[in-house]
Image: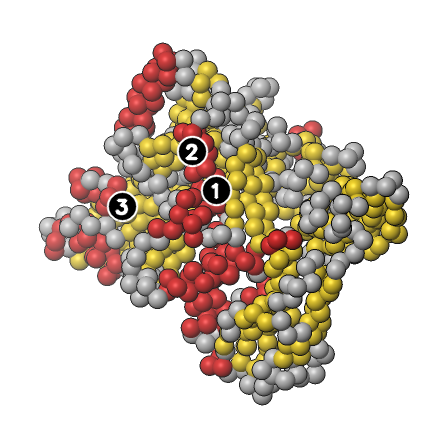
Amino acid sequence: MLNLYESFHVPGIPHVKVYRDDERPHKFYMVSERAGIARDGSGNPLFTFMLYARDVDRLPEDQLDIANGYLAVTAQAGVSRETEEEIRAYLREMLQKEHRAGRLYLWRPVRYTEPELGYPDLWLDGSVRFRALGPDMVPHEAGSTQPSLIGANTASFSATLSQDGAELFRQALEEELVPAGVWYELTFAARIPAVQIRIRGDRGAFYREVRDYVRRRRETVHRYRFLGWTHEITRREEWSELASITEFSRTFHHLTIEVDDSTLPGVDDEMRTRLLNMAFGIVQDNVLPGFFEAALREVAGEEEGDPGDGVPVHTVDTGTLDITINQSTVVEQKVNPSVIFSQALSAEELRARTSYLNLDRPYFQELDVHINANVNFDDDPVYGLKVFLEYDHTDEARGERIRRVREFLFRSAEEVARFRVIMARDADGVPRDSYRYWSEISYEDTGETIRVPRTGSTEADDRQLVISYSRLGFIRVNVLLGTMPESVRAVHVRMRYPDYSAPSAEQSFELSREHPAATFFTYTGKPGEPQSYHYQISYLLADGGRMDLPEQTTRGETLTIRDPFERTATVRFLGQADFAMVEKIIVDAVYEDAANGLQSTHHAEIAENGEVSAWTLGLRDPGHSEFTYTVTIINRNGSRVEQGRQRAELGGTIPVGPGAVDVLEVTVIGSTADWSRYQLVVVYLKYDDADNDIYETQSLTFRSAADPDESWKVLLRDRKRRSYSYRLRFIGADPGDNRETAWTGTDDTVLIIQ
């Protein structure tokens, strides 16, 4: 599968990133950061611009009376044949050098020197937009909103231009400037080497760092585009702190990125640097956008008088962040190729693809249809696809039958065929522009051929005929295993298409870290858009248990199996004792969620004062947070003290041992705020005792003078450390009254809001 380790650009081709397969070192994948115009088998661009005009036979082009126009184009997020051959030649030379040197790629020998080259096997999602002039000049647009998600991601579009739009487009062609283009947003799947990346930190503390960072930057930056999100500021400046993991770590201290490469033999400094850079790239693509976008909205809302633009702090700055990514995890990577037509087509090609149709003869001269197949011939059990087109009409003006039949064989999603015929006319001279088609798809393993439709043919008038799975009556779903906790050993997925009775309509897959992907592929029994399919997920737990979820229904082309635990909670057991007399403290904790068939246990033996044993577990039901624990104290004189079973809530720190030395209890009084001005007050509290590893935080919300006083308790290990910090945020009925105080330290046990 495509791997994120050691991606590179071929010299002289900076817009194409090349990735390598982690199991076959001679296989490579191209991801183009620039889109292009698809071409037919003869190399001609699939671009057509037609203008309707009068007196075409008598006047030169610059004097024609243009009425309106028609534009059709097929784009792709791929590379040209010439570019592909350049990349292939470079890879061939690279493989030859590696083979001679005996180089290992991820500890696999390079045995073959002829490269396999293609596009990512697994496109997860994507959208595509087509724009030609403004909406006042383009009365009608049609075409793809989602690309093929196969190979080079072909997408076809057409547009009708008004008189002004057609004339502007024609003049732009003369100046070799084409005011139209295509913009893609694509997501593909990738893996990492056999390492483990852990991303963790306090969500609230990191979010506050990001928000403060954004607030500072807003004073200096004018307009920037970061992680796909554009924002207006004061002047332009580079965000160098986000350029590398080193700069990031210097700026942000509440999010750590760790790479455990202990499972890889012989990792040197160069490899370790590549692994760290890869990990930071994953964080940039998959973690940071949510924090930065929320912070940008909140800071912008504060300045505009709307507190957080609907993003209150307490919705994003609670809990912990703890993400583990390993080789089996499917990592999502994004790419946004685009193309302006004048960049992809030469002036000669533009002129050659521009034609004038004479309105004095009210019919089209030629039917010109482009055909391509959105079929994954590489990964699906499909040998080939035949498409038959038939044009059969009588030209009543001439009294003759015009019939043309052609057969096209497709073995690649990048192939584009062309069907052309002079159209017949009816008695009024109106062209008859419809045709009929049918298809035959052949299975690779069995040789079975399915004709679609089973009998007869389908009538169409599309100029861009895309034979997709939905047209053929097939359904194809990528089933992917998302990030799973260690408590989940594997996932069993049962899938079925309810309206078809053949054996292929019901399939089962078992996904694991070793086999994280599968494909559900079946004929639905009839052509056309498929109905919803059903799937049922069973999580096979590491302790031998099994968790079955109810059957669900969806139409999605990608089914990602998510972590079944909606929330991760951590409890820290803090040892507090005189270990000159106490040998150790034993903690046994149990969490049970009978409704979901879950049970988790934790055993700890603490032998030092201030030692912390952390217990992190996933919750299926976030509202069920109660657990029980027992504490056994083993004294050095051989005696033992059994403390009975106690109940507690997940989260925070629990002192265990003979007992805490003291308690800090703070009473917060909210009725004293000026409630004629404010509609909400949020109080943030924190207590830090680094020497004893105690970090307690709390946020309290007051909404009116009628709200009762709140109490906050912290168990102390050092009775002299009684200081804590607080910060107040006031949300006014009038946005002009919004304000926020700085963090303030105090040891006053009564905090009055005012």
Which sits in the foreground, 52 or 28? Answer: 28
Position of 481 with respect to 86 (left or right) is right
Image quadrant assignment for residue 317: bottom right
The residue that appears at 52% across and 58% down in the rendered structure is: 207
Badge nearest the viewer, 3 or 1: 1
Dot 2, crowdedness within 10 Å: few (<14), some or many (≥20)?
some
Determine whether 415 is above or below 304 in the image.
above
Please name the residue that numbered disc 1 is placed on: 282
Dot 3, crowdedness within 10 Å: few (<14), some or many (≥20)?
many
Element carrying mark 2: helix
For the residues bearing labels 2 and 1, Cβ distance under 8 angstroms: no
Residue at the outermost top position: 100
The residue that appears at 61% across and 79% down in the rendered structure is: 753
Determine whether 170 is above or below 730 in the image.
above
Query: Could you say which disc has been placed on residue 578 in the image?
Result: none
Image quadrant assignment for residue 599: top right
Position of 281 with respect to 353 (left or right) is right
Please name the residue that numbered disc 2 is placed on: 274
Please name the residue that numbered disc 3 is placed on: 341
Q: Is residue 343 visible?
A: yes
